[in-house]
Image: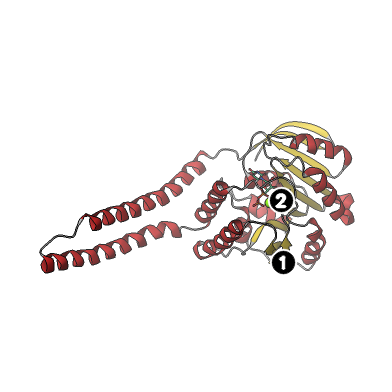
Amino acid sequence: MHLSIVVPCMNEQDVIPALVERLAAAIEPWEKDAEIILVDDGSSDGTWEAIQDACLHCANLVGVRLSANRGHQIALTAGLEAAKGERIMMLDADLQDPPELLSDMMLMMDRGYDVVYGRRIERQGETIFKRATAYLFYRVLNTMSDVPIPRDTGDFRLVSRKTLDAVLAMPERSRFIRGMFAWAGFRQIGIEYTRAPRTIGETKYPFRAMMRFAIDAMTSFSTKPLKLATRLSFASLGITALMAIYVAYSLILYQTAPGWASVVLAISFFSGVQLLTLGIMGEYIGRLYVEAKNRPLYFVSEELRDATPVTMRKSA
Ligand code: UDP
Ligand code: MG
């Protein structure tokens, strides 16, 4: 198998026909030696039926159905583990990333690169809020992270078999896949593209999901937040010292202790610092707990290959 394309899908029933059509056109030059893997991440709409239906019409299609919703990054992992290709492309179901970039990415790989990722130079039709948070996310992540993670780059990329095997050998439960590819190394290059608006369906990343994703990203790729706790404690000690001077000064000058306002301020400031520090610790301890349980990331409940159903397969 030369080429695999992996697409995680959650509640994307309306997108699947257009998606399959665009992907089938994009893989035409490699058609005889290519597979398109659609992973149904525990959808509650007719996504699986749409995938089954598409499988009847497109011989290159492989359908993988997870036993429950496991989230974007795990669904992507499931697809990557099912992929058999020498080169593997991954993209979102909603066609925000143009599949037509495949031929350019293949050319780059012919030149010897192991990872060709898409870098968004523009995001069309997304809210100012999403653009601003995404902008901040990639920049904060990079100052925190111990490995440089390419900015404004999602999971849209073409990777070589050896890079994919390296990433799949990483056992962690909380998966931040674009970071894992960055960490893996090998020869990487980005190509720029404009990210189209989502035309069908709605985003599966509401604010809460985005926050979780950001916290996962930071804590999986850096221990700097833990060090932040130490820095914060120094800062608060410094502020306490300044306050002590002020208290002594006002005691001598006005013969009165400062009023409740400064006390309340101090209490709330320091309890805030303590809670933040505890929260950061908690994030890491929670992750240790999840890793220690060492559960399989997902279960496949159904698989469609050559339109023949295979039942119950467990992840490695
Ligand atoms: N997705 C998934 N499981 C989830 C959430 C999202 O498989 O729990 C898929 C979704 O179907 C899409 C991709 O992940 O193919 C990215 O989601 P989306 O386009 O909604 O994110 P956005 O582009 O708005 O950041
Ligand atoms: Mg999208």
Across and down, in percent, residue 135 comes to: 58, 62
Mark 2 residue element = loop
**Does the image show residue 138?**
yes
Amino acid type for the residue under numbered disc 2 = Asp
| Labels 2 and 1 touching (C-beta < 8 A) | no
Is ligand 1 less than 8 Å from the beta carbon at label 1?
no
Residue beneath disc 2: 92
Q: Give the amino acid type for the residue marked by disc 1 in the picture.
A: Glu
Residue plotted at (75% across, 52% down): 95
Q: Is 62 placed above or below 96 here?
A: above
Ligand 1 neighbours mark 2 (CB distance < 8 Å):
yes
Residue matched to label 1: 192
Q: Is residue 302 above or below residue 74?
A: above
**Relative image position of residue 199 (x, y in whole percent):** 75, 50
**Residue 89, image x and y in percent?**
75, 54
The answer to whether any part of residue 114 appears in the image is no
- Residue 93's x, y, as percent? 73, 48
Residue under the point 10% across and 64% down: 255
Answer left or right for 172 relative to 162.
Answer: left
Between marks 2 and 1, how big is the CA–CA gap?
Answer: 17 Å
Name which residue lies at 18% across and 60% down: 258
